Image (cartoon, rainbow, N blue to C red):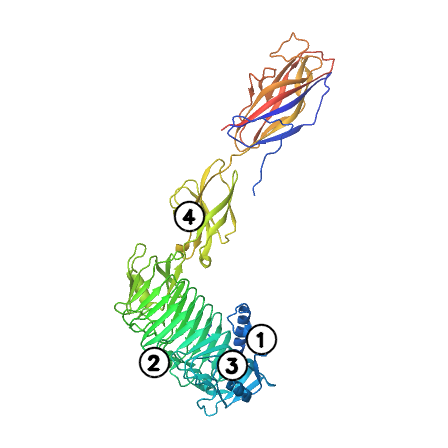
Amino acid sequence: MKKTVHRILFLFLLVFGNYLYAKPIRAETIMTEPTSESSYSQDTETSGDLTRETKSAEETILQTTESVEENFQAVTESVDEDLTEKPDSISDEQTYADSWAVVNNVSELQTALRKKEPYIKLAGPSAIFNFGNAAIPITANVTIDGGDRQVAYDGGVLNLNKGLYTKVSGLTIRLQNMTFGSADRTVPALGLYGIMQSEQATELHLENINYYSDRGAQPLYLRHPKSKVFFHGVNCFTQQKANGSTAAGQEFAEGNNFIFEIGSRTTIIQNTNETLGFLWLLKNPSNITLNEDAEVSITTNHNFIYSNGINNGTISLGKRAKLSVKGTNTGKGNFYYFDKAAFLTVGEQAEISINYPNSLKLNNGSVFRFMPESTGNFVMTNSESIFDRDVGTNSLFEIDSAKRLKFQGKSGNTYNPIGFVAGNNRFQFKSFGVNTAGYQVRINENAPVDLTPQKDAGTWTIGSADISRSTQQNTSDFTANEKRLLKAANSVTLERLNPPAKVLVVAQNVNVNDAAFQVTDYQLNGNEDKFRQLEFKLYDQKVADPAVEGDGFIRQKQTGNLADTVTFSDLRERTDYWLYVRIASDPDSQSSEWLEIPFKTQTEKLNVTFPVEVAFHTKKKNNRQEIIPADSYKIDNNSSFAVKIQATDFQELSNPTGIDLLSEADEDNRKDLFLKLTEGNQTLGVLTKNLQKQPQGFKDLAGKTSTSLGFSGKYYGNSQEAQKVQYRLVLTAERKD
């Protein structure tokens, strides 16, 4: 146990009679850091304080044309900014030089096309370039730049081969930076095949095209199986009247292949009166492809795909692409008009949203795949199930570490919300990737209920009413009650569970009676939106499960801020504790494991206040020179524990007249000093130069208490002569326990 040594200077003054020598009292507090050493020596004249401080609303098709225009402008502005560094845009890399044929009217345009000019720019004094009812055939590869002009197009009685068209196979035609018609419909865009028509194999590239028409068959007519339509930049197509009501018209396009290029933004609103489908796919193979970062938003009052091929074609979304398709008409409310095989691949981080009245119809061999980090939102407003509960055999719905899938039907308790039903179909989870810990299964978004999660790759067997799943190591089948809930639910959401959060490092600042902790390194592993709070639980013993709060539990604290510091006070010194810390998430499966942090509070410093200088003098009493202390002197134990105090050494510093210290009273002596150390009114012993061999002990001094130090004895010398002597008394203090 550490021992503190303290030296006190004594001044002794002998005077005649009752003359009192007085000296101001000085005291010094000694505080020591306990160590494993057996003793500690400190000279109080130079010691210091060693204490260390620690411290949707969904958009309706019947919107006004003004709002459509405003929305389009907003999209255009944001997308233009996004695409400033994307060279895929055609017109961004072009400048008008001698290679461009500049035309001022439709006649000059027809002439330039007959001459097979490769680059043509619409010009002229007016902001409106009038095609009129002219036939404008294209016979060679060409790029036509509208210069941001509006194109007036009046197909009259909607004859064939009016406006832009080609009868030459294998051409690449580019149209860019032009608006057909106007948002208020005062500039006409009336044509049987509004923008472009071709029966031959043609590649049509559209960039930054606006189309507003309330009369016409369709904007795009490219019926050859090998024809392709490419969308670049920002495009907006609207087939409805200016007030948002239904226009005279048919499909958006007749064709087989539609490619939305990297980073493009395309908005299509179709509200026409005659057609069976938004797209008329003529033969197989037929494809709708969104390349990386492309975004397409489609609102239609028709069935989405009307296919003459043996299947309904392939929809493919590249990385981070987004496709939203909304059907608004219950009478024409099928995503696929025909019950044929269909193929859908949603790529990494891509998102598809299908909101239609009626269930999806799929025939034999259909395949829907969702790749890592992808999202799927299926909403059917007029059916309890997303799929029609009669999916063709050998069909596959595969979830490959997708981020989130929602299946939402109308309310009812006859059928489950998924409906992917057939004898040997597979609704399955592919082997989980490294960032997939399983799937949360949640029903009914308005009053959500979480079912037991899907923690292993496996297969669901989906009937018309019931859903069951294969039993795996960490995943059991749904309980009977869960199956009942699934049948009655109007939605099922599968949300990927990332690996649980993880606490890596907790900084600590441990003192005598308190300890502060801060999580300084952690991993949320994609669970940022699921973080609930940090939890700290303090125990005075090691436990197997901190959540139980059984034996040894002291208290707990929580904070909703990952950067907060949490402090536990009123701790015992020199005591072992165990702190358990975790990140709590919702759902709890995403919470971290408890991190165990054992720690021990510090030992309290020895804190004793001694007098630094004391004095005594003589007073004549009973014909003797009695030793009297000059003042009251105290020793204060400021520690919370008991201390042992001893006088261990007594040294002479100044004695000019040679006064000796006597070991016992001697009435025959005529010059020396008999000096005793006292505590209160109790004598501890005689102070001599042999004190080191026989230390004198004070009573054990309890924590936060004091005792007095004093002197008594006799001086046998000449009382008529003043004497002055100096001594140094060494006191030691050590912890009692």
Q: Earlier in the sequence, mark 3 or mark 1?
A: 3
**Pointer 3: what residue?**
65
Q: Nearer the viewer, residue 186 or 510?
A: 186
Residue 673 circle label: none
**Pointer 2: what residue?**
308
Q: Secondary structure at mark 1?
A: loop
Residue 95 circle label: 1
Given contact means CB atoms under 8 Å apart, are the residues at marks 2 and 4 in contact? no
* Residue 314, horizontal then vertical, whole percent: 37, 73
In space, the residues marked 2 and 4 are separated at their CA atoms by 60 Å
Q: Identify which residue is drawn at 43% across, 64% down.
A: 349
Quadrant in which residue 713 is drawn? top right
Q: Earlier in the sequence, mark 2 or mark 1?
A: 1
**Pointer 4: what residue?**
594
Given contact means CB atoms under 8 Å apart, are the residues at marks 2 and 1 in contact? no
Q: Secondary structure at mark 2?
A: loop
Q: Earlier in the sequence, mark 2 or mark 4?
A: 2
* Residue 531, horizontal then vertical, whole percent: 46, 56
Q: Nearer the viewer, mark 1 or mark 4?
A: 1
Q: Amino acid at mark 3?
A: Thr
Q: Amino acid at mark 2?
A: Asn
